[in-house]
Image (cartoon, rainbow, N blue to C red):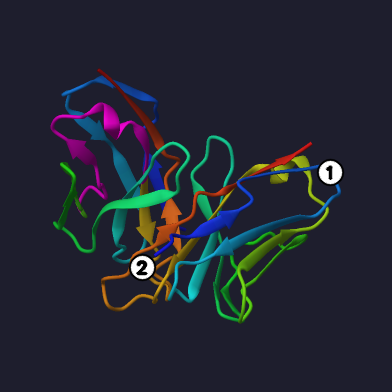
Amino acid sequence: GNSVTQMEGPVTLSEEAFLTINCTYTATGYPSLFWYVQYPGEGLQLLLKATKADDKGSNKGFEATYRKETTSFHLEKGSVQVSDSAVYFCALSDPGGTSYGKLTFGQGTILTVHP
Amino acid sequence: NAGVMQNPRHLVRRRGQEARLRCSPMKGHSHVYWYRQLPEEGLKFMVYLQKENIIDESGMPKERFSAEFPKEGPSILRIQQVVRGDSAAYFCASSPTTAGTGNEKLFFGSGTQLSVL
């Protein structure tokens, strides 16, 4: 079956540091890949997505590139801010499914950014 | 336009009681998904519903769990005879359409934290 593996957290960084959160996946076919972010007390929000190999998703300074050869979708940001502190989830959509909303999630990575 | 509304935010039940979790999708959304997040784990898909229909319940436990999305009113996730292992955060998400256009987007609620004593 499909699966998503994220680097274990928590991740603690100082403001303006470089961020990488690793994500690898297992799926048959060609899934779409996503990063969701959950701020304290809120629901998940879509951060960025990529729908085919070599696509780069980007939003709010975050980027991730769909690498089919390494089955990876690592999240990066060049300079983090305190306001980026949240839980980050990597996810994929079922490539053989009929529902876009049926996602497989990684376990989440807690990011804390200190001033 | 209000977002996806879930209530209650926190629900405490004793073993053997029933839990009812409610989800009102965003206005204009006719597709609802329920996910469960156990401690230290990612979200796991449970069920996908459209108005008055269960489309995919492949992630639902076979016993004690049921879901509905009536023509009028919110979607309900119902857990009968709760056990301690049901303690988790339950998230609802809605979307206006299914796969095909490439512009689909899921909108999540803030979740219901169920605690079973």
Which residue is denoted by mark 2 in the rendering?
A: A95
- In this view, A30 is above or below A65: below
The residue at 58%/62% (across/down) is B23
The residue at 43%/66% (across/down) is A101
Q: Which tag is nearer the camera, tag 2 or tag 1?
A: 1
Please report the bounds of the magenta region as a residue range: A69-89
- Indicate left or right for B97 with A66 as reference: right
**Closest to the observer, A36 or A30:** A36
- In this view, A5 is above or below B50: above
Q: Quadrant of residue A17?
A: top left
The residue at 45%/41% (across/down) is A107
Circles 2 and 1: CB distance less than 8 Å?
no
Where does residue B77 sit, x and y in percent of width and height? Answer: 66, 62
Where does residue B105 sit, x and y in percent of width and height? Answer: 34, 65
Which residue is denoted by mark 1 in the rendering?
A: B15
Near mark 1 (Cα within 10 A), the count class, few <14, some 14-19 or many ≥20, is: some
Q: Quadrant of the C terminus of chain B?
A: top right
- Indicate left or right for B4 with A68 as reference: right
Chain identifier of the residue bearing label 2 in the image = A
Mark 2: which secondary structure?
A: loop
Are marks 2 and 1 in one subunit?
Answer: no
Mark 1: which secondary structure?
A: loop
Q: Residue furthest front?
A: B1
Q: The residue under label 1 is which amino acid type? A: Arg
Distance from label 2 to label 1 (Cα)?
Answer: 38 Å
